[in-house]
Structures are given as structure tokens and as C-alpha cells.
Image (cartoon, rainbow, N blue to C red):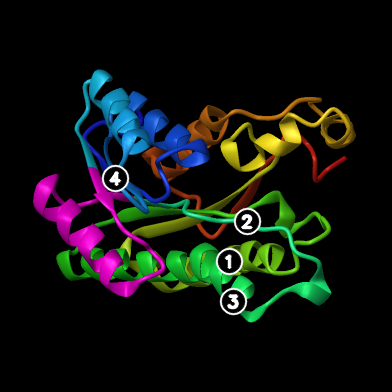
Amino acid sequence: MKLKGKIAVVTGAGQGIGRGIAESFADEGADVVINDLKADGRTDEVAKSIRNKGRRALVVAGNVAKRDDVEHLFDTAWSELGPVDILVNNAGIETIVPFTELTDQQWEDVTNTNLKSEWMCAQTFCKRLIAEGRKGSIINIGSIQAARVLPGRTHYAPSKLAVEALTRNISAEVGSHGIRVNCIHPGLIDTPMIRWVLESPEILPHVVAQISLGRPGQPSEIGSVAAFLASDEAAYVTGQALYVDGGWVGK
């Protein structure tokens, strides 16, 4: 087990990629703190799944774009499960709005959730690790749209490309403390966020035709890569951005 004895915080873990990562971590031996906007049936299902794998699970609701909620998340994780070893910044939202119609609020909602939250969670986590002299790993979740232009995402795409720059810069500053920071850019992954694409007979074939492997990915396929990056097997990997997209960018 790659992550035996480790404790991980996964934001936005109530469904989709976040759930896939949380469950993959549990398969590899980690206890998992499940964060989402609210505790509900979805987060309960993820917690049950993790416990069925023989690992501990803790649900901590909160908006990670808000400083107080971030502090509460890590305070609770530390006090209930113990010192955290791994942070996965997965929480994110996407809206599709034509550039000339994009409002200030729409810009702020997306960039706050997709970028500001990753900065605040990483900063809070790193401060604790450094104060306690502990090593750790951070995995930031970006998007294929850091490299692919799709209409209506002039707020979403910059937030995800910025995650890559955030990753490199944080890694340079905390590497001497034994903290590694990497980024995963998922491609077309079978999640509720893009269900409208998967269910469209007009759109799906056009998108899949651009993917070398010819299919959407599964959340577990992001989870397995995240587990590797979080583990000691990736001990010399930091400041990197990896496209896990079935060959979409390269085609």
C-alpha cells in the first residue's frame, strides 16, 4: 500500500474526481478527510465507502474559498484524525459564459473556488507542517483547459492555468521543508460536472475523436495518479504538472 498510515484531506470530495481520489487513497491505506460545501448523502456515501475499505473517514463541510472555513477544516482534521500528510486541492466549479457577457460575480465565483481556495488551503497546510517539522505532499487539480481552448471559459481556463503556476511557485518555496507540490490536469472524466457532454450524441463523439485513447476517463484513473504523486514512490517529483487526459493534449 503506497499510503499506509497516511492522513489525507481531499477538498470537493463529495462526488466526481474528488471522490475517486478519496477512494483511491483509502485503497492505498490512507485515512481520508472528506471536504465539500455541505455534509449530505453524497459525503456520507464517500465516508461509508472509505470505512468499508478499513480506513478512517471524517466529513468536514465548508467553503474552502473562505479563510475561516479553511482553518476549521485543518483544525478539525488535526484534532480528530491526527497530523495531515497529504492535501488534495480538488474543489472547483465551472460555468460556461460568452466572454462579452461574463460578469464580475461570475469571474469571482470561479476564480475564488478554483484558485484562491487552492492557495489558502496550501498555505494553511504548509504553515502547520513547517511549524511541526513535518514533511508532506500537495496535489493541485487543474484542468485540460489549461492547454485546450474551449468556448465560454475565459474565466475558468485562466483559473486552471494559474493552478499550474501556483504549483511551481509553492514547490520552490517549500521544497527545503520536505514538502512536495504537484499538479494534475484531468481531461474528459466521467463526472457529474460534464454529464451533459457524456449524454450528448452530438457533442460526445466530437470530443472523443480528439482523445488518443478514444474514451472518457474514470475518476479512479485520476485517483491512481494522485496516489502515486502523494506517495514516497514520487519522492523526487515536485513542481510538475501532469496531463491525465488519454492523450487529448498531445493529439
Q: Is residue 74 magenta-colored?
A: yes
In the image, is residue 85 above or below residue 16?
below
Asked whether 38 or 28 is in front, the reply is 38
Q: Which residue is mark 4?
A: 39
Residue at the spot of label 1: 110
Does dot 1 land on a helix, a strand or a loop?
helix
The single residue placed furthest to the bottom in the displayed view is 104
The amino acid sitting under disc 4 is Ala
Q: Are marks 4 and 3 in contact (CB under 8 Å)?
A: no
Query: Few, some or many C-alpha atoms within 10 Å of disc 3 (few <14, some 14-19, many ≥20)?
Result: few
Name the residue that disc number 3 marks: 105
Residue 183 drawn above or below residue 128: above
Label 1, residues with CA under 10 Å away: few <14, some 14-19, many ≥20:
many
Return the disc, 2 or 1, that comes first in the chain's sequence. 2
Residue 141: percent from left, percent from top: 54, 52
Amino acid type indicated by mark 2: Glu
- The magenta region covers 59-86
Residue 201 in the magenta stretch? The answer is: no
Q: Earlier in the sequence, mark 4 or mark 2?
A: 4
Please tell me whether mark 2 sits on a helix, a strand or a loop: loop
Tell me how many marks there are: 4
Could one spot residue 42 in this view of the protein?
A: yes
